[in-house]
Image (cartoon, helix red, strand yellow):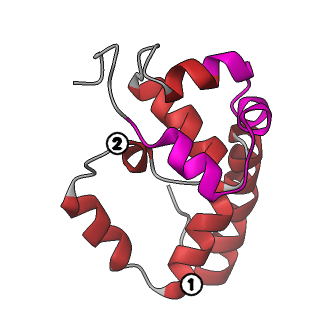
Amino acid sequence: MFDSVRMKNRISEIRKARGLTLVEVAKRANTSNQQISHLERGRRKLSYEWMERLATALSCHPLDLLPDRPTDVRSTMSRLSPKEQGLLELFRTLDAQEQDTLLLAIRPMVAFVTGVNPA
């Protein structure tokens, strides 16, 4: 399913809804604007790796990039509290290195507050 060369997707729709240019998304995804354009138009394969990179760049879930997102993922997101949704949205605005740094920093804080060392 993910290997279809002309796979329809919602990359352009989400990018425009976020008010981002091809260049801005490309910078966030560490690639060229031409590559983003090819992915948007289905001229390049939208592998799961690309979905993850683009989801981070667009602050969304990788499955949001598909035209028919499975309903079970949507229902999971709707079950999150407003605080959880806010944290997730904030986390998704960070690049991969910033996410890793935040996770390293937050684990000791959670252990201090709860007395439990998170995995």
Quadrant location of the N terminus in the rendered image: top left
When the figure is inspected, residue 106 is found, relative to residue 49, above or below; the finding is below
> For the residue marked with disc 1, what is the amino acid?
Lys
The magenta segment: 9-35
Residue 31 visible in image: no
* Residue 66: mark in rendering: 2
Residue 119 visible in image: yes
Q: Residue at x 22, y 53 (%)?
A: 70
Instruction: Please tell me how many numbered marks the rendered image carries.
Output: 2
- State the image quarter where residue 72 is shown: bottom left
When the figure is inspected, residue 53 is found, relative to residue 33, above or below; the finding is below
**Percent x, y for residue 55?**
54, 43
**Percent x, y for residue 80?**
40, 79
> For the residue marked with disc 2, what is the amino acid?
Leu
When the figure is inspected, residue 4 is found, relative to residue 14, above or below; the finding is above
State the residue position of label 1: 83
- State the image quarter where residue 111 is shown: bottom right
Residue at the extreme bottom of the image, as rendered: 82
Dot 2 lies on which element? Answer: loop
**Percent x, y for residue 19?**
72, 55
Local packing at callout 1 (Cα closer than 10 Å; few below 14, some 14-19, many 20+) is few
Mark 2 or mark 1, earlier in chain: 2
Q: Residue at x 20, y 61 (%)?
A: 71
Is residue 116 magenta-colored?
no
- What whole-number distance in Å separates the C-alpha atoms at marks 2 and 1? 26 Å
Left or right side of 105 for 81: left
